[in-house]
Structures are given as C-alpha cells and as structure tokens.
Image (spheres, coloured by chain):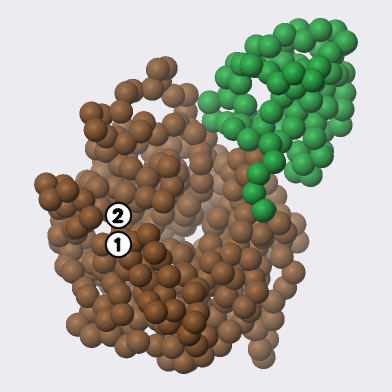
Amino acid sequence: MHDRLLVATRKGLFTLTAQGGWSLGPPEFAGEPVSMVLADPRDGTLYAALNLGHFGVKLWRRRAGEPDWQEVAVPVYPPQPDPLPEPLPGGPPTAPWSLQQLWILEPGGADQPGRLWAGTIPGGLFRSDDGGDSWTLNRPLWDQPERREWFGGGYDYPGIHSISVDPRDSRHVTLAVSCGGVWQSRDDGASWACTSDGMHADYMPPERRGDPNIQDPHRMVHCAGQPDALWVQHHNGIFRSTDGGAHWQDVVAPTSSFGFAVAVHPREPDTAWFVPAVKDECRIPVAGRFVVHRTRDGGQSFDVLDAGLPPPPAYDLVYRHGLAVDEDGQRLAMGSTTGGLWLSDDGGERWQCLSAHLPPIYAVRFG
Amino acid sequence: MPRIVFAPAIQRHVASPAREVAGTSVAAALAAVLAEQPALRGYLLDDQGRLRHHLSVFVDGVAVRDRQWLSDSVRPDSEIYVVQALTGG
C-alpha cells in the first residue's frame, strides 16, 4: 500500500503523504496546469506533464532520491504533409500534426526499463525507451486509415487517454481513444486492431452506433491480476470485457451509467468503481447527490457509496483520471473538478475529505 | 543589429535576456537566439515550427504577418518583442 498520493491539478502538482494522517505538501509547478503525473513503479521516477497555455506541453522528470525536477523532451510530431489531407467527406477536421495535450503517461513492462508510452491529443501514441529523453511517434497507429475518422470528444481533436500494458506480455498494448474506440497491438506497436465490438453509441445516427471506430470510451482500465478483464466508462454507459476486449457487454448502473472515471480492483476483476453523473452535456451528479458506484459481481449489482462524501447539494465531477485504486484494492483516491479530494481505506465504504479547496483536479495517482 | 526582447511570462520558464542578434528577418533573429538557447524552441514554436498559437511577435510595434515562417523583415535598428496573448484565469 502506498503512502504517497500525487494530485495533478490545473494549478500545480500536489503531493500528500500518510504519516499518521494525510498531510498536504506545497504545490510543485505552482500555477501551472499539470495534465498528468506518473510515479514509475519500476524505479520510483516521477514524471509530470504540463500544459502551459501559451508555451505548449512540457514534461518534467524527477529521479528517485533526487531533489530537483529536470525538464525532458516532449513528444514532437514529425513534419506534416503539405498540404494536410482534406477531411473525409462528412468526416471530422483533419488533426494537426502538433502536440496539444499529453493526456496519459504509462510505464512499459517490468522487462522494458526506460520504456514509457504517452497518449496525446490529437491522437498520436508516442514511445520513449530512455525515460523521456527522446520520443518516437508510433506510425503504424498514426498511419492507420481509420484514424482519420476519429473525432474529438470535448476537445477539438481526438486523444488517447488510457493505455494498458499487459503484465503477461509487454508487447501487448491496449489503448482507448476519445473518440476512436479501443485499439490493441500484440507486437509492441507494429500493428493495431480496433477491438470495440459490442460497444454502442446511441447518440450517433443508427447506422453508425455500433461502429467500433467511433466509440467514445472516456476511460479504460484492466485488472492487473487478470488482464483480460477490462472495464470502460463510455460516453454511452459502462462496458465490460472478460475476453481481452474481443467482445464488450453493457453494464447498467443504478444512479446513472454516465461518467468519466473507472477503477478496477488489481486482483478481483469483478470489482470496479465509477462516479456517476447526468449525461451527456449536463455532467453533474444526479440530483446534486455525489456518490460512488461499486460493483463486486461484474456489474450485476452495484453499491451506491456516499459515507463521508459531501451531502447534497454537491456538484463535484470526477474526470477520467480523477479516480485511482492502490495496489491493495482497498485504498482509493478521488479528486473532483471543483477541487475536492477524498480518500478511502476500505474500498469506498467510507471516505475522508483530504481537501475541499484544491484547484480543479485532473488526475490522482498513488506511488 | 536588431534587438530582441522576451516577455516576463516567457522568462519565467526559460530566462532569456534582451539581446542584439544578427538577422534581417524575424526568423533569422529568432534562429540566432535558438542556436544559443535550444531549450527555448518548444516554448515559442509548435511541432511544425510555427509560432505558438497564443504568442505574438511585434517588430517595431507591428504584429508580424507571417506566423508560419516568420519571414517579416527587420531593420538593423528594429526592436523585436516576443509576447504572450492574455488568456485564462
């Protein structure tokens, strides 16, 4: 169980440590939007991705035991074709070949020291093999003809926000795109296949609702102990796969099946947590009641958990990276876009508020 | 030689004092700075080498017209200001 919680916010990176109670340290990168943070479990290195409004995306690294952060390279898109291809007939605008957001950062496998995967807006997947000193765009995915049909969901351009590396085989990488479905590679990124069969987007025209390539997974996670068990909080609801993403099934939650975040127990694939909200554009807790959904039977039933969470009216929204479960499957953290931060040590039964006044929270991670 | 000045908001990230640089275009002047300070590149230019969307460059008080190639000319006594647009909260 980790006693450090990293909180990436619109106004800096906050670190909380548990020594008796949880204490909040001063922000690092104070005032800067921190879009993603990673504590690499392989060597303890910290990474913080900044999205400076005027000056672009930056990545900083702090090696374990070192006091200072060091700015390292960011993913850079190669020279774009001139002119850019015209949009497909009736299709989304052509994405620029320019980094807009570093949306997710994940370590490679235990057998791949230095390997990092970065998911970005406008939809490029980048790989580093030297801890962020250099990056390479994954061309097989970027050059996939279907990519031109991806479109932005909440942002102007599509983006990769979830990456899962299979602990059984580091060459097996699964990622999720808003809006472009779930994609998998079994050869370390040399080839990709869209694996969103069974997902549906009922807000689309009937002919396109089942199109695997236009699905809008808001967040995808796998069970570390049983990686073929995947959960997706989708724009249209919750989907679950028990066969490594080959097929997805609908799961209906009680309060609302809409939301952004999902976390899955690291060893119990039937146990997952969600934070419901009113669909689609409304995006507030249902009736101002801020709750967490938990299933322990693969989505057949849900507990509605609110002990320790603020009573109604509470309009906290938890964004896609704002919910995390620790390696013990009991400790959870949750941060909202209105700056509320909560922690549970018993699988969500009871929550304690660590702060109600942080900047808007983009991501929480243990490590 | 033209003089190039970076706004304090940029200096906050990468200190880059005002200096005189050789060049008869904004691009040439900027290239001279970036040769000395390559770390500044990503703060000013995007992946395709264009001036970042929320930055502006003024030459003698006039915003440059060519944000793609920064081909606007500068005179030996020109003052080049690199500044940020004001956005957000």
- Where disc 1 sits, the SS reads strand
Left or right of A323: which side holds B85? right
Q: Give the mark, 1 or 2, whose residue is nearer the N terminus.
A: 2
Callouts 1 and 2 close, C-beta under 8 Å: yes
The answer to which of A243 and A237 lies nearer the viewer is A237
> Which residue is the site of mark 2?
A216
Count neighbours of disc 2 (C-alpha within 10 A) and say few if under 14, some if 14 to 19, many if 20 or more: many
Where residue A172 sits, quadrant-wise, is: bottom left
Q: Is residue B75 above or below residue A350?
A: above
Q: Amino acid at mark 1?
A: His
- Which subunit holds the residue at mark 1? A
Percent from the top left, x then y, of residue A249? 16, 67
> Which chain is green in the picture?
B
Q: Is residue A255 above or below residue A195?
A: below
Q: Is residue B20 above or below residue A122?
A: above
Residue B56 makes an appearance in the image: yes
> Which residue is the site of mark 1?
A234
Q: CA distance from mark 1 to mark 2?
A: 6 Å
Left or right of B3: which side holds A63? left
Rendered residue at 35%/81% (across/down): A293
Q: Is residue A72 above or below residue A62?
A: above
Rendered residue at 28%/85% (across/down): A302
Percent from the top left, x then y, of residue A192? 25, 44
- Specify the colour of chain A: brown
Q: Amino acid at mark 2?
A: Asp
Q: Which mark is residue A320?
A: none
Left or right of A186: which side holds A339? right
Percent from the top left, x then y, of residue B89? 67, 53
